[in-house]
Amino acid sequence: MTTIIPRGRGPFVTWEEGARDALEYDGLDQVDEWSPARACFEIEKFNGFGYRNRGVPSPYLWSFTNHYSRGKYVADGRFSAAAVDKQCGAIPVMRRIMEITGATFGDDTRAPKPTEPAPRKSLWALILELLALIFGLVRKPVPAPAPNPYAGDPAPHLAVMRKITGTKEAPGDADNPAILAWPKAIGERFPDMAQYCRGYKHDSIPWCGLTVGYALAAAGLRPVFGRRDVDRFLWAAAWGEQGPELVKLDRPLPGAIMVFTRNGGGHVALYEGEDATHYHIRGGNQSDMVNVVRKPKSQFTAATWPRALPIPKDARPVRMDAIHNPVVGRED
């Protein structure tokens, strides 16, 4: 696990996994359109723009070319005008890759002569090879999507929640890697949420909304994600509002997203059933784990349903014995 900057990333099983996480952490996986100028900009940004303030071409890009002669940061915040970088910059590395692979920048519109082989690689392939060389990242082919195990389930998110039942928060300052993997999975499924997900780093942060968000994302459904932070899935109350991702329900049914008030905040989980005075809900951060508890109906505020999922027409409230599940512990 990283202990300096950034702190708390990992642990990683392989070096390649850590390198990929570094690229994602710096947002390089979010660049949609690459060009030569954008590639230079992103590579320089990774190292820092301090050389610009001194009028020196960054050796991180230009070392070993005629555009760079001297000037180097020999330590953090310490610049030497006489020092010369002895490492090859990214641009000559990129050029050499082009020479070896026959890659082009994609802006050469000349039609190849009949005896000329067509360009073998695009700019995007060039950028990937450059990143692989600089960061040691090996990009693996994306496998075909696996069959959806929840296809045909009227409440697939509830099936996911049942599957992860028993997951516990780590005691003390430790973190359960299974819980920390949930925001990453949400960000991978819905890239527009990736930056928000990267902000969740410890399971001591309230995670009832995260658990519901993961259950939906794992079932292919978008978690609530409004414009403001308080309108996004980590906030329990955000799940009670109708919007692009959710519709309001007039009565609970299995899999309904149930929102409650409590002292000091709110709570969100999924409906399993009810008795005369309590709802039986399955969710996370309930006594520090994913389980089923009873929650007083007097604290209930709203029930919603994923908009992309048809509401089962024959679904009805599920009656349960009042002692079927333990009385709710604490959620925080």
Image (tube, rainbow, N blue to C red):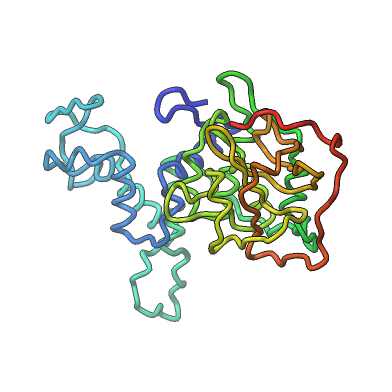
Residue in front for this viewpoint, 244 or 189: 244
Is residue 233 shown above or below 36? above
Whether residue 276 is visible to the viewer of this picture, yes or no, is yes
Side (left or right) of 81 relative to 25: left
Residue in front for this viewpoint, 325 or 191: 325
Q: Residue at x 55, y 20 (%)?
A: 173
Side (left or right) of 115 relative to 15: left
Whether residue 16 is visible to the viewer of this picture, yes or no, is no
Is residue 44 shown above or below 72? below
Residue 328 position, x and y percent, is: 72, 32
Residue in front for this viewpoint, 90 or 244: 244
Q: Residue at x 81, y 61 (%)?
A: 315
Quarter assignment of residue 68: top left
Residue 253 position, x and y percent, is: 76, 56
Residue 238 position, x and y percent, is: 53, 50
Q: Residue at x 32, y 59 (%)?
A: 36
Quarter assignment of residue 202: top right
Position of the C terminus by quadrant: top right
Side (left or right) of 280 relative to 80: right
- The tally of labels here is 0
Side (left or right) of 25 relative to 183: left
Quarter assignment of residue 234: top right
Is residue 326 shown above or below 198? above
Residue 318 position, x and y percent, is: 83, 51
Q: Residue at x 56, y 34 (%)?
A: 206
Residue in front for this viewpoint, 323 or 111: 323
